[in-house]
Amino acid sequence: MKIGEWISAIDGFIWGPPLMILLVGTGLYLTVRTGFVQLLGFRHGFKILRGHFDHADDPGEISHFRALSTALSATIGTGNIVGVAAAILTGGPGAVFWMWITAMVGMATKFTSCTLAVHYRRIDESGEAHGGPMHFIELGMGPQWKWLAVLFAVFTAVASFGIGNMFQANNVAAAVNTLVSGHETVSSSTLNLAVGVVMAGLVGVVIIGGIKRIAALAAWLVPFMCAFYVITGLFILARNIEAIPAGFALIFSSAFHAPEAVAGGLLGGVIRSGVARGLFSNEAGLGSAAMAHGAARTKEPVREGLVAMLGPFIDTLVICTITALVIICTGAHEMDIAKGKLTSAAFETAIAGSGRLVSVAIIFFAFSTLVSWSYYGDRAVDYLFGKKAVPWYRWLYVGFVFLGSVVKLGLVIDFCDAMNGLMAIPNLIALLVLAPTVAMLIKDYFHRMKEAKLL
């Protein structure tokens, strides 16, 4: 077996059923352990997000809203467009139901990791925040577990160059090719070289300024790109409003009855497709978002956790659902179309010419992911090698943006995707061990909020 086949096989194993069971199982456990925080703190989370509890003198670097925008800009990407199509093609419409289930339990997972990120973070003498799984593993579980924190940081740094960088840059180049010529082919063409130069320049201008500049861009870009995509999708659904009840009915009925043509007729294939794409879409359990939320300006860890758990809700329960309904309600899921073109075909079926809007959305989504994932990588490098190494990492990251725009990806992406999956293991171990700490923080916070009549 060639090295490429080995890496591809390892990647498939890492992202196989064991990891999915661990991710979803941890989410279910944390849901119970936190007292169903998804329901308990949902409304309060939006109140925090609107700035009701913002204080300029609190420790941290960015507001609650900017922290969530940064985390969302990293998770809202091609998975919300192409990934949903892949789930439906692989597991049928019922896969969407299992995406919803994954997002619901993922809210508890993300709440827990981001609460811990603030609780165990370090603010240095310059006011810079150092938070994330590597810090709460070492500080929360003890110095003897530092090796686990180092593993998480290494996996994150490596993954940032692939899934967070080259894969996204490649998607931008493909989307630009589609807009210009109607073909997605990515080669070392003049167009792709131009895309690479422009993208590298734009990313460099943003990320050299660190989290404050990244968050400032995300705070503008995320609401814009979400509104752009959601409004277009809702307009299409409004034109097919009579098909929406049947669309939901198909999702629910197919969730427990796999058609013979899908995944060999096995219900496990439907569940696996939905769970896998749900996890890929919202990244709950990987620990990535905890690094962005760890920079939030707050004295209350639980407060930031409540904001963070809104991420899977917006990413999967809103945006992915709109994509799925457009595909199902327009009948595109019954067409013989490749997964990369299914969503565009669905939009085009509803409104002539709107398929190009999907390519525009991919450009925005992929660019925002490029920018935010650079912060995850530089937090990992900062933990491993210190502040002096961060500028070198950022310049190297910019170089990989150009590279990802002009080369064909295969082996590199499989390897980095494996690293992306491996991030979850140290993070989930820490979440399970430190869940009692989070439960105590929740109890204390809500008790104080009730006494102060702030809920």
Image (cartoon, helix red, strand yellow):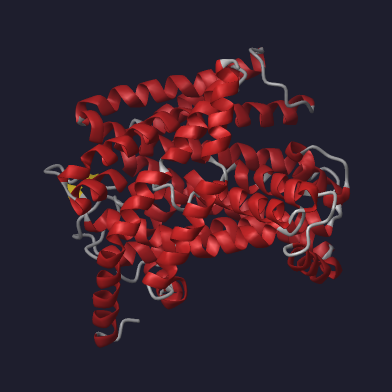
| Residue 302 on image: x %, y % | 30, 66
Residue drawn at the location 55% of the way across and 28% of the way down: 414
Front residue of 432 and 413:
432
Residue 73 appears in the picture as rendered? yes
In this rendering, would 417 be left or right of 227?
A: left
Q: Quadrant of the C terminus?
A: bottom left
Q: How many marks?
A: 0
Q: Quadrant of the N terminus?
A: top right
Give x and y (percent) for residue 88. Answer: 74, 50
Picture quadrant of residue 50: bottom left
Q: Residue at x 43, y 32 (%)?
A: 160
From the viewer's side, name the closer residue of 311 and 140. 140
Residue 386 vertical placement versus 74 (above, below): above
Q: Residue at x 83, y 63 (%)?
A: 239
Residue drawn at point x = 87 percent, y = 50 percent: 334
Quick check: can you spot residue 47?
no
The percent position of residue 120, horizontal first and vertical second, equals: 21, 54
The quarter of the picture where residue 426 lies is top left
- Horizontal relation, residue 417 to residue 248: left or right: left
Q: Quadrant of residue 340?
A: top right
Give left or right: position of 264 versus 287: right
Q: Is residue 275 above or below residue 364?
A: below
